[in-house]
Amino acid sequence: MSAALRFDDAREAADLAAFLGRLIHYDRAAAVRLQAGGGALAVFGRPPSFEVLAIRTARLADDTVTLDVTVSAGELLESLDELSATTHVPQAVTGPPWAGVLPPRGGWQPVEGLPAAERMRGAVAAAVAEFRSRDEALPEELRTRAERERIGREIWSRTLGSTDLPLRAVHAAQSLGFLRPVRALASAGAPTAPEPVALFASGPWLRLRTPYGSVAVRTAGTGGLSVTPA
């Protein structure tokens, strides 16, 4: 029988379900790596559209549970019961290459120079508008997938502020629900204080952390920018 997990409360289960749903939106066959210990569950996923690794954590009711397994994101979502705040861990699957390579657990140091959250959202909106404009301006003979991908790589590889964080990481954070507009929080009755978004580095790794999840990228390696769990 598969292992059962009980979350600290229903909100933890609901937030995890939302994250899994967003991953499946980008990849119906998505796999996630689960690591549990010390009363917390970390869920790692890699949405292919962004080439970043996304990390969502959830508090568990039992701090003695230990787990490290790669499973189907869809099967995990199907087994998750938000009302009872429980889930059953599906059978393990053969993980994709990224699931076998994790960055260091410690040694993360704050990085200065990251723009405010609202400015980062503005940068993403401007980049989306630029891509659409340049795509529409392409002559018919250049309207190919390769040319569109070249434009996309150029835009999303730009860095934020005085950091080495690529814009693609912020785009992923926003699309996965990690970088939420203040007005959206206000409409839900949440405080309107600025979000404590921060950037950290450990060796070649960068990690953008928000209250709702993180994205991690590796800025050094073969073939340019690559991405891996954190």
Image: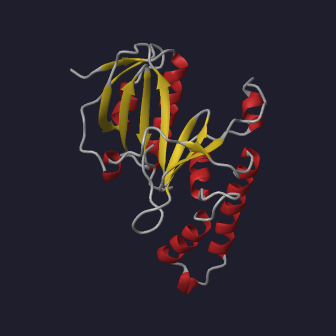
Q: Position of residue 56 (x, y in %)?
A: 49, 35
- State the quadrant of the N terminus: top left
Residue at left 53%, top 28%?
15
Q: Nearer the viewer, residue 213 or 90?
A: 213
Residue at left 53%, top 74%?
150
Residue at left 42%, top 27%?
41
**From the viewer's perspective, is residue 146 above or below residue 198?**
below
Q: Furthest-left residue in view?
A: 1
Q: Position of residue 195 (x, y in %)?
A: 71, 36
Taking the image as shown, residue 167 lies to the left or right of residue 203, namely: right
Quadrant for residue 104, please give it: top left
Q: Position of residue 36 (x, y in %)?
A: 37, 26
Q: Count all numbered tags in the image, as a single digit.
A: 0
**From the viewer's perspective, is residue 214 above or below residue 17?**
below
Quadrant for residue 230, please give it: top left
Q: Nearer the viewer, residue 222 or 95?
A: 222
Colour mapping used in the image: secondary structure
Taking the image as shown, residue 16 lies to the left or right of residue 67, namely: right
Quadrant for residue 130, please give it: bottom right
Q: Position of residue 29 (x, y in %)?
A: 35, 46
Q: Furthest-bottom residue in view?
A: 141
**From the viewer's perspective, is residue 75 above or below residue 203?**
above
